[in-house]
Amino acid sequence: MKKLVFISASPRKNGNCDSIVEFAKKQYENKESVEVDYVNIRDLKNVKNCIGCDSCKKTKKCIHNDDIVEVLNKIYEADSIAFISPIYFNYPPATIKMLVDRLYVFFDPSKGFEVSKDKVKKMLVAFSFGAGPAEEYDKVAHTTAFNFMVIGVNEHKTIMLGNQNDKKAFSEKVANDSELAGKMKSLFDWLAE
Ligand SMILES: Cc1cc2nc3c(=O)[nH]c(=O)nc-3n(C[C@H](O)[C@H](O)[C@H](O)COP(=O)(O)O)c2cc1C
């Protein structure tokens, strides 16, 4: 059984990121070999930022006991992560930076940025955005996956979905573009392999 976790980062309901997740849900719904947990960052009520107190370096535990702790545990347990995010001013939204900074609990300063061998995993980074530039966001996607090495990501893929200012852009495109639909399917299959 493969354990997948979807981290969806759009503050906007029923927009493109939600449609990407809906597309994935349909693909996985009858697959018995896959267990998928869907987390939406906008549903978290209690989110605190890393304050750099370093107490996790002694206790291996964060001093915050908020909703991020459970999300990090889910990511830790997963075999694969899908990270679906809009671009806000050239980066994923601020709530995602709060989550990423909290990866510090898994960071070992004596090792630096290297893949944590505890539980290795794959990651897909999918960005939805407007005009771009897509190539810059692809770099941001690689950096995002690089940060997740500390929680075991050793392999990643990215997909850049531009011209998606309209809420319905992705759902309309994917319904009419078999190449895009095939590409999305193969990425979701790859996560479940
Ligand atoms: C505050 C804000 C900032 C944005 N900044 C960018 C940007 O820097 N580059 C870009 O191409 N699109 C930008 N966009 C457009 C969104 O990335 C785009 O509409 C995306 O598809 C939204 O995803 P959603 O439909 O899941 O909410 C921005 C949108 C908002 C609301």
Image (cartoon, rainbow, N blue to C red):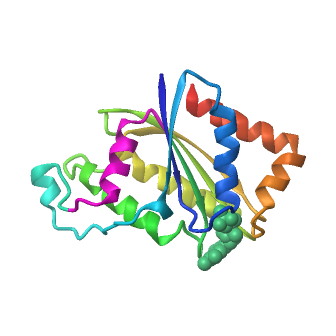
Question: Is residue 142 shown in magenta?
Answer: no
**Quarter occupied by residue 62:** bottom left
Boundaries of the magenta span: 64-80
In percent of width and height, residue 155 lies at: 50, 37
- Is residue 56 toward the left or the right of residue 129 in the image? left
Q: Residue furthest left?
A: 58
In percent of width and height, residue 100 lies at: 39, 59
In percent of width and height, residue 33 lies at: 55, 21
Say above or below: 146 vs 129.
Answer: above
Between 15 and 178, the residue placed more toward the observer is 15
Q: Residue at x 36, y 36 (%)?
A: 77
Q: Residue at x 47, y 71 (%)?
A: 94
Quadrant for ligand 1 reads: bottom right
Image quadrant containing the C terminus: top right
- Is residue 77 toward the left or the right of residue 172 in the image? left
Q: Residue at x 72, y 36 (%)?
A: 185
Dominant SS type (magenta): helix
